[in-house]
Image: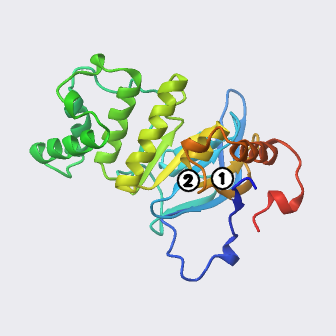
Amino acid sequence: MDGLTATANDSEVPATLPPALLSVEGVTLEYTGASQIVRATQNVSFDVWEADRFVLLGASGCGKSTLLKAVGGFIQPREGRILLDGRPVDGPGPDRVVVFQEFDQLPPWKTVRENVAFPVRVSGRLDRKSAAERADYYLDKVGLSRFADAYPNALSGGMKQRVAIARALAMEPRVLLMDEPFAALDALTRRKMQEELLALWEEVRFTLLFVTHSIEEALVVGNRIALLSPHPGRMRAELNAHEWDLHGGGSAEFQAAANRVHRLLFEDVPPDESNPT
């Protein structure tokens, strides 16, 4: 057994399940290239529930980052719609905050505390004192309390990314959007950041939409995984992956799960294996 199960389609969802927090319904996305209109995704649909760790997994160029930007409100769908709390997403908002791959996103003239507090304060949600207190709370959650008065140039890449995560969580968004946030880190730091993200989720239970092209990362970070086909991105399958964590990564069962995901992504597979049942 590889520990993966297909997610039921809408007609099979139990009536007792609460409404989805985020719904992506038949979304087709396009952008203008150098000389033509490029279709990034085709008729993509999925639901994300409160406290899900939902992963968009696919090869480079399959439109997963474009899809994340659309959820963030930065791109409008060519077809379909995106709903948050049952309301259409029609632009960016503090209820969706993005952590990008580039970890050097912190203004160097602000301390770590100021970097985390600034977006909360300028959004008008909190005054300066309350914003600083919230910054200290989330810096403690990511293990950086003793660096609150340091400047970004004193931090490693992994520490800067932890500050970016604390800054995003300090906004207390409905959905935290992460676009390959650890891809630029070395393997050991990446593993550590995955551990810290999962430990933070266990404590705070935020809702996560996470983009990656790493099958192994998808299995350990996500409890649900949407597999997107190569360009343009289409839904190939949606899988439950509750069983896996960082401690099982070297097991034969984990490798079997990774191999199955690879087949679903890149090979022609029988309908009963590629479609939700």
Q: Quadrant of residue 146?
A: top left
Q: Looking at the picture, does residue 79 appear above or below residue 198?
A: below
Would residue 182 be found to the left or right of residue 122 on screen?
A: right
Q: How is the image coloured?
A: rainbow
Q: Position of residue 111 (x, y in %)?
A: 20, 26
Residue type at mark 2 is: Phe
User: Is 160 in front, or is 140?
Assistant: 140
User: Is 167 in front, or is 214?
Assistant: 214
Q: Looking at the picture, does residue 89 appear above or below residue 20?
A: above
Q: Residue 226: which numbered mark, if any?
A: 1
Q: Which residue was labeled with disc 2?
A: 54
> Quick one: quadrant of the C terminus?
bottom right
Q: Secondary structure at mark 2?
A: strand
Q: Residue extending furthest top?
A: 153
Residue type at mark 1 is: Ala
Q: Is mark 1 in CB contact (under 8 Å) with mark 2?
A: yes
Q: Position of residue 242 (x, y in %)?
A: 59, 57
Q: Residue 271: which numbered mark, if any?
A: none
